[in-house]
Structures are given as structure tokens and as C-alpha cells.
Image: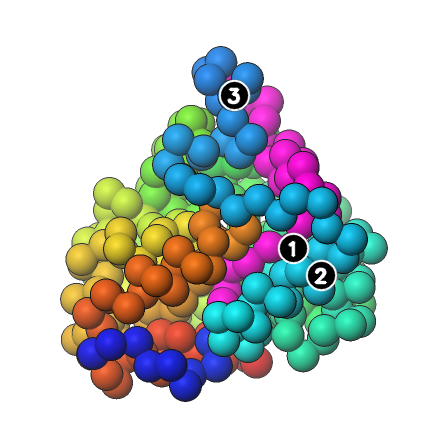
Amino acid sequence: MAMPSDIKIIDTMLGIPEAEDRSDWFAAFRPLIKDQQTLQQFSMPAQYMFKDIPQSGAVDDFVTWTVEHMDRHNVDKAMVGWSGTKTAYRAKEMYGDRFFFDLPCDPNGGMEEVKRIRQVHAEVGLSAISVFPAGTLPQVAINHKYMFPIYTVAAELGLPVCLNVGIPGPRIPMETQKVEHLDEVCWFFPDLKIVMRHGAEPWEALAVKLMLKWPNLYYSTSAFAPKHYPKAIIDYANTRGSDKIIYAGYFPMGLSLERIFSDMQNVPFKDEVWPKFLRENAIKVFGL
């Protein structure tokens, strides 16, 4: 049941810094934050949840720095949010075999955002799009009408949608990310692959129930150290859900790969679950 050492891991949530100061990663929803501790003391809005947030220090080449960390931990490929910056283009050009991309989207953009998704996909070849519902401004719920053009274009392009679900880590309202909202979306878009991100807590049991109900609903482990994977998710992976649970980390946003893979040794997955969790499910869902 121990994690095998010979699997080439696919990480479905990893970031490449643009600079030593990474506060710009969270600028989009900073206006939602009201508490002074977050505004004045935190370098990232959910800092109270994480210890030993990875720091890069002064680095000449953040793309190579990221790949070096991946190599140390047998991470073969990683999905990164496409930013359209020089760093993103360098990652694609230099390490096109190591990185694949999701496009973070804002449903408040309406049809302009739909057009942008099409344009970026035509240029980059996206593997997914993603939305942080509680982090949109104004906030947009998973099943809100503004989301439906996003889901429609994703379905037309054959792209999975990654959604943050459950109580958000930043100190912002949670209503938009209630897991129950997924039920309507899965019903209306039966062929659309949806991947839950960021835990689904405290509704992880409901997340499992919905994955049993809807064939194209999946769960990724992003932003959770393995020691904190919900028991309901581990039990589901070990029984009926081995094809539904996908590894995602959170490096370097909140967790180091050292921390993740040190903890991972103690996750009680069955032997036959590990290859699916660490690699095969990502290949299937994201069309790698």
C-alpha cells in the first residue's frame, strides 16, 4: 500500500512563479478581502492554513527552477494556469513535454471571455479551463447563469472544467462554492468533465455521492497536504472511485513538493489505486 517509486507522476495543479514576490497571483480577488490580518500580514490570502510556504528567493530562471523541483520528486508533467506572460511562453517552448495548461476564467466577462477561451485554446492547445467561483469579482456561483456560457464553450471544445469547491481558504464568502451546486451543472451538461479542486470540505461526503451519481464528475487533491486528505475521499478511491480521484499538489503556492511526497508515503491507498491516482486518471481526464 506504500506509494510506488517508479510511477512518473502527473501533477494537475502546479505554478510557475513570475518573480520572488508572488502576491500578484491573488490580486484578482483582493478587493473581496476585508480582514486586516490578511491585508497587512499575509503574502497569500489563505496563509493561516499553511506552514512553511515555499520561497524561491532570487532566481534567474523560474521555469528551470520549477522543472528542477519536479525532477527531484519524479513529477513527469504538470498542469499550470496559462497566464500569457513571457514565463508562460518560455515554459511552453522550452518544456512543452513537461507542462500542459488550464486557462483561469472569469464568468463575469460574458461572451468576451468565451471568445478569449477560444482564442487561447487555438493558440496554446489548452487541456482545461478553470474557475475559482468565490474568487470572482463579483462572486459567481458554480450553477449561476453567468457560468453556463463557460460550460458551453468547454463542452464544445472538449475541455474539462476545474472548479474550486467547498469553503474557500481565503476569508471570503463560501456560498458560491457549495458542492450541491454541482448537481445542476452535471445534469445540464452530462458530457462535460468537471474536476473538483481544493477539497470540497465540509461536504466531501456529498462530493462522493455526486461522483457516484454523475459519470463525468472527478475530484483532485489540490491544496491539501496528503496527511489531510479527507477520509471519505480515500475510502472512495479504495472502493468504487479509483477512476475518479486525481493527484494535484499546490507547489509553490502553499505546499512544497518535499512536504507533499513525504506525507504521501502514509496515505493508505490500495496498490492498484496508486497508478490511477498519480498518473493514469490525469491522462484520461485531460486527454494527455
Label 1: element kind = loop
Instruction: Identify which amino acid the numbered label 2 is placed on.
Output: Val
Q: Are marks 2 and 3 in contact (CB under 8 Å)?
A: no
Q: Which residues are magenta?
A: 10-34
Q: Is residue 143 left or right of residue 244?
A: right
Which disc, if any, is residue 109?
none
Q: Residues within 10 Å of mark 1 (few under 14, many from 20)?
A: many
The image shows residue 70 at horizontal and vertical percentages of 56, 68
Q: Are marks 2 and 1 in contact (CB under 8 Å)?
A: yes
- Give how far apart the Cα atoms at labels 2 and 3 are: 28 Å
Front-most of 236 and 266? Answer: 266
Assign the C terminus to one quadrant of the image.
Answer: bottom right
- Return the residue at label 1: 16
Q: Residue at x 49, y 76 (%)?
A: 74
- Name which of mark 2 and mark 1 comes first in the sequence: 1
The image shows residue 118 at horizontal and vertical percentages of 73, 62
Q: Is residue 22 magenta?
A: yes
- Name which of mark 2 and mark 3 comes first in the sequence: 3
- Name which of mark 3 and mark 1 comes first in the sequence: 1
- Work out whether residue 164 can be spotted: yes
Which disc, if any, is residue 63?
2
Q: Is residue 78 left or right of residue 221?
A: right
Front-most of 187 and 139? Answer: 139
